[in-house]
Amino acid sequence: INAEYGKQWYQRRVRGLSISIPVAGLCELGPMTINTIVLPEIRNIYRRVELKCATSQDPIDRHAKEKIKALLVHKCADVVQEHMPELLSVDDYEQKFGDIGREMFFRVMRPPGGGGMM
């Protein structure tokens, strides 16, 4: 019983995290890869994650969604700041990046040193 439970748990866990592996790999290839491959598809990537997790009650899927979102925001924010200075408001970010735009905006516009808002 324990072996079967462990196998099912592992399969669910891998399924939930399966999209994060290619996203993490692409983001590790550097700013040019992020700018040319990840950013143009960030809206679609995040939409796929949202759709997959919207119907799932599995906490592993919800955790995977949050990890993927954090990974995308963390890795892409510096590239956005450098290559897209024309984006100035939350609305600009939401229009360009979709649902993940708000988090991207606050990551890019945070003060140096990572201090929070007062």
Image (cartoon, rainbow, N blue to C red):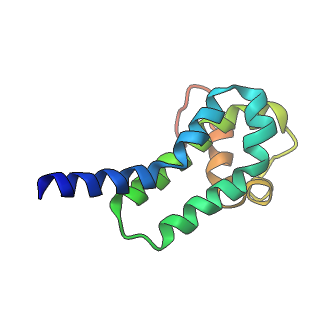
Q: Residue 98's image quarter?
A: bottom right
Q: Residue 114's image quarter?
A: top right
* Residue 92 visible at all: yes
Report the number of numbered marks: 0
Q: For the N terminus, which image quadrant?
A: bottom left
Q: Residue 47's image quarter?
A: bottom right
Q: Residue 28, relative to residue 69: is it above or below? A: above
Q: Is 111 or 84 nearer to us in this picture?
A: 84
Left/right placement of residue 18 relative to residue 95 reads left
Residue located farthest toward the right when viewing the structure as drawn: 86
Q: Which residue does the image show at 88% across and 43% down from the upper left?
A: 86
**Residue 78 x %, y %:** 70, 31
Q: Which residue does the image show at 84% across and 37% down from the upper left?
A: 85
Q: Residue 95, relative to residue 21: is it above or below? A: below
**Residue 16 x %, y %:** 44, 55
* Residue 111 visible at all: no
Q: Which residue does the image show at 22% across and 52% down from the upper left?
A: 6
Q: Is 114 or 23 nearer to us in this picture?
A: 23
Q: Residue 75, relative to residue 90: is it above or below? A: above
Left/right placement of residue 12 relative to residue 68 reads left
